Image (tube, rainbow, N blue to C red):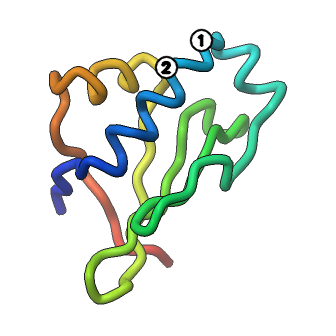
Amino acid sequence: MKHKFEPEFLEICHKISQENLDLNEWNLIESSDQFQTNKYCGGFDGTENEFTFSYFDDNNIEFWFQLPLSDIKKVETGIITEIDIRKAQ
C-alpha cells in the first residue's frame, strides 16, 4: 500500500536534516520514538540501519515504513513523495 507523505512528516525530515549527522552518529543516538507528531512516531533503528516509523491513519490504524538516511533529504525536497507502508503486526 502506498502512503503519500503529509506535511507533518516533511517537518520531521527537516528536523533530521538539521541534525546534520552521519550514519555512525545516528547509530550512537538511536531512538525508536525520537520524532513524534499526531500521525507519525519513529526514529533511527541501529539494527535496520534506517529510520523506522509508525503512521496512524484517520481511523488510528497503525502502519509501518522505513527509509534510509539518504532518502530523508529527497523526501524533504519533494523528490520522494510517497512510500510503501504495511499494516503493523
- Residue visible at 32% across and 38% down in the picture: 10
Q: Amino acid at mark 2?
A: Ser
- Residue visible at 66% across and 55% down in the picture: 33
Q: Which residue is mark 1?
A: 20
Give the quarter of the image for residue 64.
bottom left
- Determine crowd level at label 2: few under 14, some 14-19, many 20+ residues with C-alpha closer than 10 A: some
Q: Is residue 78 left or right of residue 50?
A: left
Residue 38 in picture, x, y percent from top left = 44, 68
- Residue visible at 48% across and 60% down in the picture: 37
Say above or below: 27 vs 34.
above
Residue 71 in picture, x, y percent from top left = 36, 23
- Determine crowd level at label 1: few under 14, some 14-19, many 20+ residues with C-alpha closer than 10 A: few
Residue 20 in picture, x, y percent from top left = 59, 11
Q: Describe the element under mark 2 as helix, strand or loop.
A: helix
Q: Residue furthest right?
A: 28
Verify CB contact (< 8 Å) between mark 2 and mark 1. Answer: yes
Depth check, front residue: 83 or 42: 42
Q: Which mark is residue 17?
A: 2
Depth check, front residue: 36 or 74: 36
Depth check, front residue: 15 or 66: 15
The quarter of the rendered structure image containing the N terminus is bottom left
Q: Amino acid at mark 1?
A: Asn
Q: Describe the element under mark 1 as helix, strand or loop.
A: loop
Give the mark count: 2
- Residue visible at 42% across and 76% down in the picture: 62
Residue 85 in picture, x, y percent from top left = 30, 58
Q: Which mark is residue 82?
A: none
How far apart are labels 2 and 1 at the CA level?
5 Å
Q: Is residue 34 left or right of residue 66?
A: right
Q: Residue furthest bottom?
A: 59
